[in-house]
Image (cartoon, rainbow, N blue to C red):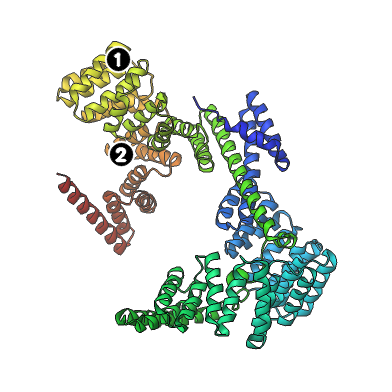
Amino acid sequence: MLLTPPTILLVLTLLVYQSPQETIRQHYESAEAQRRAGNLVAAELEYTTILGEAYERLGEIYSAQKDYKRASAVLESAVGYRPNSSDTLISLAIACFGEEKYDRALEVARKALVIDPQSAGAHQMMGKAYFMLGDLGKSIGELETAVKLTPDDIDVVYTLGIAYLRNAQSAEAKQLYESMVKEFGERPQLHIVIGRAYRQAGLMAEAAEEFKKAIALDPHFPRSHYYLGITYLLDEGQSKIGEALEEFKIEVAANPEEFFANYYLGIVYIFQRKWDLAMTFLQKASSIEPNNPDPYFQLGQAYQELNQHEQAVDALKKSIDLNPNLTHNKNQVTKAHARLAQSLLKLGQTEAGQKELQIASDLKAQAFKLEQQIQTSAPGMGQGEVPARDTNLPELGFEQRVNSLSLEHDEKTMQELKNGASYYEKILATAHNNVGLLRAERQDYLAAAQQFAMAVKWNPKQEGLDYNLGLAYYRSGSFEEAIPPLENELKTHPQNLQSKVLLGLSYFVSEKYAMASELLGSTVDSTAGDINTYYALGSSLIKQGKTDAAERVIGQMKTVTGDSPQLHLLSGELYFARGERVKTLSELGEARALNSSAPRVHYYAGLLYLKLARVDEAIQEFDNELAVNPNDIQTKYHLGDTLLASKNLERGIKLMREIIQARPEQAEARYKLGQALLQKGDVPGAIENLESAAKLDPEKADVHYQLGQAYISAGRKAEGKSQIDISKHLKSKTTKSDNKDN
């Protein structure tokens, strides 16, 4: 019996208080009404609608949190549920853009435009993607179209202004930004972002004017004085260092935890050679962002100027540890190694100093090559001398930044986003679980297991999910996959008898006989005479050579369950283990005479006939099993393997193809199919399946050997030799391991 988790009630309670999710509540109520009426397909459609909505909303939240990698993955799922939604595709394009996958963002935005040619969002994202791919002409064209479609969209207008500036169309940009101020009013936020756009385009005088306007509107607005100060430095350098210093001081006084203001105040004091003051603010900056290498690098320089070389070594090593290669700042890491070498040499550590000098030299050469590559590539917008977070690329969520009132508001927003993500993750877990329950009711256990696995991914602590997942895998015949969730269930609920039995049976089918016998031995007296438990326990003991213990289980089984095919099969297996072939065949005859329709009875009979080399009887038993249980993967595999070994290639190949269609990850079936196709002369088909088998099971020597033969048959001799060499290496490794164990 699958569990219906109580968390559904909790999620529904949450829905009451979250009005934007009213649509989800309505679909949930409709789904439950359809389920009660027996319309399971219609109920599932309602749940898939919930999944599409929840995946899209969660992806948008991840994007707002700047977790674009997760956002992209989640929104790809959303598109799977909503392939014809231009809004969903635009959300995905935004996430891909944030992940710096500009080609993919462009591709997705194009799809959205096919669905809705008048979509301003699609044109905007195409414009942003073209911008980052270096095609300013197409970028401006798309953004101008977006502005015509939505002239009041501040984000689109702002982005077009950046593109104009990048394309040296400053008059057009200025006209746009003036219209923005007229439309949305005189707000410091607006002047800050416009100023940043001008500054990034190198228009420092215009940038400074915008920052001054922001300060005039609100002298305490976060970072406004910092932006003006850094603009002074970038524009006039040493000549405006005094003005920059005053702006940074004002910023630090108003926002003492502001990293950039503290950092650049320290930099200015370094320019002025006021080392003690510089260290005060650089140490503060490093405490605000302890994983940022920049303050430590500057501290190292200050310590060196004060001849405090031991402290300089510590600071420079910290900077290098946080920035070990050229990705963060090409020149800084090179100089850090050179400065570290100087201090080490001053301290008499000559060998270590020489080593650092060599590293600095190597990095300088690498940086030169990298710089040449960058100069020949098509860049987006230059980064200047300002830290990456302070650049002004075509950004996302501009309107949210303009409407942001304070840093405290940002923190509040981030907490709300975190709460929203948690909410939608629970919605996804609940909806996937409910779809799984509906699939299980229709006996589509593999699809049910896939849904339960998704539910576990989104809410692993949800009550009952591990059991549902383990049971669905078990009933679908995916016994090895059933083991981890059932083990998890027993850790949480060690008294769950049904989970113990299912786990023990899964161990047995997966040939983990010691674990199976230990677990099933502890449950057999509590399972009310379950015949499958007795059989698995007895067979596990036999396979471990514990025939006396198995004989006691057989006696107990006969007393509790009476005569049965399973009893005769187990007795036959015991006789076979003891070398009594005649008695084995007799027990098999007794089992066949009872003509059981119970699952897996004929399958186990077939396996025993194979041990006796009675191939025809084995094939008959496997066929009988498939008549009872036509989708049993293990039976199909053993029947197909037996047929292939008997040179019945056509039917054997057909069965292996059926297995792969149902379970594409089945490495052994792909190996057998590839081997058979090679025998038939279908070399391309053999290579395709053997390559898949090698990826799925790279440690299997025989797979590499057969793949090597297939490559040689295709005329790919070098690749064939390589695969055969891999096969030899794996066999040698296995032989050494076996000898070590012996």
Between residues 39 and 357, which one lies in front from this camera angle?
357
Q: Residue at x 52, y 28 (%)?
A: 3
Q: Is residue 159 above or below residue 269?
A: above
**For residue 342, which quarter of the picture?**
bottom left
Between residues 383 and 675, which one lies in front from this camera angle?
383
Q: Crowding at label 1, few (<14), some or many (≥20) Cα neighbours within 10 Å? A: few
Secondary element type, mark 2 = helix
Quadrant in which the C terminus is drawn:
top left
Apparent side of residue 476 relative to residue 376 in the rendered image (left or right): left
Apparent side of residue 405 relative to residue 488 in the rendered image (left or right): right
Secondary element type, mark 1 = helix
Q: Which residue is mark 2?
A: 644
**Which amino acid, mark 2?**
Leu
What distance separates the C-alpha of mark 1 from that of mark 2? 28 Å
Residue 707 placed where, x, y %?
Answer: 31, 54
Q: Crowding at label 2, few (<14), some or many (≥20) Cα neighbours within 10 Å? A: many
For marks 1 and 2, give the one nearer the viewer.
Answer: 1
Q: Looking at the image, do the residues carrying marks 1 and 2 touch, with CB atoms under 8 Å apart? A: no
Q: Which residue is mark 1?
A: 593
Q: Which mark is residue 536?
A: none
Residue 626 placed where, x, y %?
Answer: 39, 27
Residue 252 placed where, x, y %?
Answer: 64, 70
